[in-house]
Amino acid sequence: MQFSEFKENDLSAIELIENEVHAYPWTRGNFLDSIKSNHTCLIMKLNDEIIGYTVIMFVLDECHLLNISIKKSMQKQGYGSHLLNEVIHRANLACSKTIYLEVRVSNQAAIRLYDKHGFNEMSIRKDYYRAKEGREDALLMGLVI
């Protein structure tokens, strides 16, 4: 597995994954804004194929995990853990004290992954996400590193 910063020319492959795995995906503009804002935008490749990506933002001594996704056909094989470990590694390099994220309360697979890596439930953000029928709550989680 290889990790590298993603560039604008990687966005077609990233968008395919994003649209495949999220009911309300980020737009190309969201990814471009992240690149232009100097967020840490990483791709994970296996045999030269992009199988996952993440966008993280550093603010003072905090790391905010904004997006993390694995190609649907590669899920449940440990790649999400590898990508999350890379996020934790990058947060350590940046001298972050805490990593924060929001996750849909219905996304139990992701919540289990975050639990496995030591994230703690901190609070609920009511009606944070768009949903098929109105809004869905987000679980705010954090990891002290």
Image (cartoon, rainbow, N blue to C red):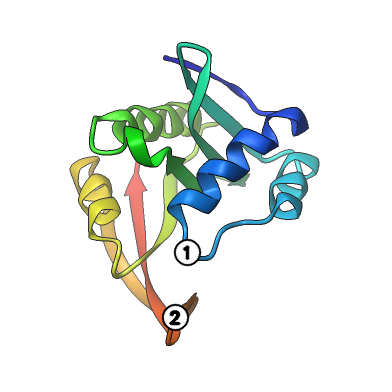
Tell me if residue 3 can be seen: yes
Please tell me which residue lies in front, 18 or 143: 18
Residue identified by numbered label 1: 23
Residue 145, given in percent of the width and then of the height, sits at 35, 38
Q: Which mark is residue 118?
A: none
The answer to whether residue 2 is left or right of residue 7 is left
Let me know if residue 56 appears in the view. no
Image coordinates of residue 82 in percent, x first then y, are 34, 27
Label 1 packing within 10 angstroms: few (<14), some (14-19), many (20+): few
Q: Which structural element holds mark 1? A: loop
- For mark 2, does the 10 Å Cα neighbourhood hold few (<14), some (14 to 19), or many (20 or more) residues? few
Residue 132 badge: 2
Q: Is residue 63 left or right of residue 81?
A: right
Residue in the image at 67% along x and 37% along y: 12
* Secondary element at image label 2: loop
Q: Earlier in the sequence, mark 2 or mark 1?
A: 1
CB under 8 Å between discs 2 and 1: yes
Q: Is residue 45 above or below residue 81?
A: above
> What type is the residue that disc 1 sits on?
Ala
Give x and y (percent) for residue 75: 30, 38
Q: CA distance from mark 2 to mark 1?
A: 9 Å
Q: Quadrant of residue 138?
A: bottom left
Which residue appears at 32% of the width and 29% of the height? 79
Residue type at mark 2: give it.
Lys
Give the image location of residue 52, x and y in percent.
Answer: 47, 33
Residue toward you, 61 or 35: 35
